[in-house]
Image (cartoon, rainbow, N blue to C red):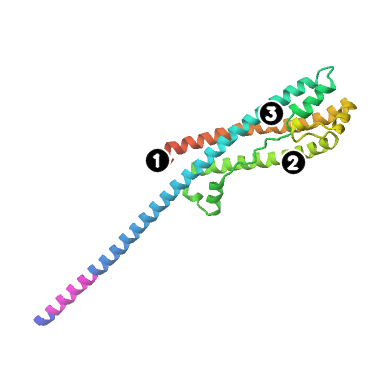
Amino acid sequence: MEHPSKGRTRNKVRTYLLYAVGEILLVVIGILLALQVNNWNEERIELNLRDDLIANYAKDLKTNADYIERRKLSVENDLECINQITDRLKASSISTDTLKNIALIEFSPIYYAFSELKNDTFSSLVSNNQLRLMPDELTAWMVDINFRMVDIVSTQKNVAELYRDNLTEYTFKYPMPIEYSLYSTFKTESLWNSLNQDQWMLAFNGVMFTKKAGYTSMLPRADSLLVKIDRVLNYIDSNYSSQN
């Protein structure tokens, strides 16, 4: 027969073990809860960061869209002027005074390249490895828009450089005024009075052709980019309207 004291000891050990197991379980549960709360906090922080980044990206897109619209208007107006000049130069007879007026007053030497498109938020997302925070669909659109922006800026930079070279070569022979209203010198008058129209027209048409080619290449790309931007802005507005 077991001694009573041994039974009491066994019960005490059992009670202690149950208590110890309970304490361990409480600690484990506490740790798991703490980890879950921490995960919730990190997820909430990432979601807030994501929403802020999307809002900043939308602002970049709106700024770029406004810039594209303004630049397109300048390009279209300049292109219309170029086309009108081209039609007039096709006339069978045109006076030297008319050519002079076209070259020195009507024709603008400015080339309206798309040089101010910016994608700072996207660049920051890439450099900080934060694209992972974005929805997959939005990420794909971001990459596509960035590619199109880089393409139009780099292409127009090359065209602008070519145009500048052609314009420089042209102005060596046929100086253009800085201020049209002040442009009147004896050298200029002598140049235009003895102008070889065929030589001038060949040089002038080369300058205009370069500008027109750049513009006609630019406009469809700009329109396509605007469509992409509008689609993404609509997506952001539909899904993250509270952030914008």
Q: Horizontal and vertical percent for residue 97?
A: 82, 22
What label does residue 242 carry, if any?
1
Q: Which residue is mark 2?
A: 161
Magenta span contains residue 42: no
Task: Single out the mark in the foreground, 3 or 2.
Answer: 3
Q: Earlier in the sequence, mark 2 or mark 1?
A: 2
Left or right, residue 35 beside residue 216:
left
State how far apart marks 3 and 2 are (Cα): 18 Å
Name the residue rendered at 84%, 37% in the picture: 172
Q: Which residue is mark 3?
A: 78
Name the residue rendered at 13%, 81% in the picture: 6
Left or right, residue 1 beside residue 174:
left
Q: Earlier in the sequence, mark 3 or mark 2?
A: 3
Amino acid on which the number 3 mark rests in the picture: Asp
State how far apart marks 2 and 1 are (Cα): 44 Å
Q: Secondary structure at mark 3?
A: helix
In the rendered image, is residue 64 in sight?
yes
Q: Nearer the viewer, residue 150 or 185?
A: 185
Q: Earlier in the sequence, mark 3 or mark 1?
A: 3
Amino acid on which the number 2 mark rests in the picture: Glu
- Based on the displayed image, in which of its 4 quarters is residue 203 positioned? top right
Q: Horizontal and vertical percent for residue 175?
A: 82, 35
Quadrant showing the C terminus: top left
Magenta span contains residue 15: yes
- Based on the displayed image, in which of its 4 quarters is residue 142 positioned? top right
- Based on the displayed image, in which of its 4 quarters is residue 109 positioned? top right
Q: Nearer the viewer, residue 182 or 214?
A: 182
Q: Which residues are magenta?
A: 8-21
Q: Is residue 128 above or below residue 115?
A: below
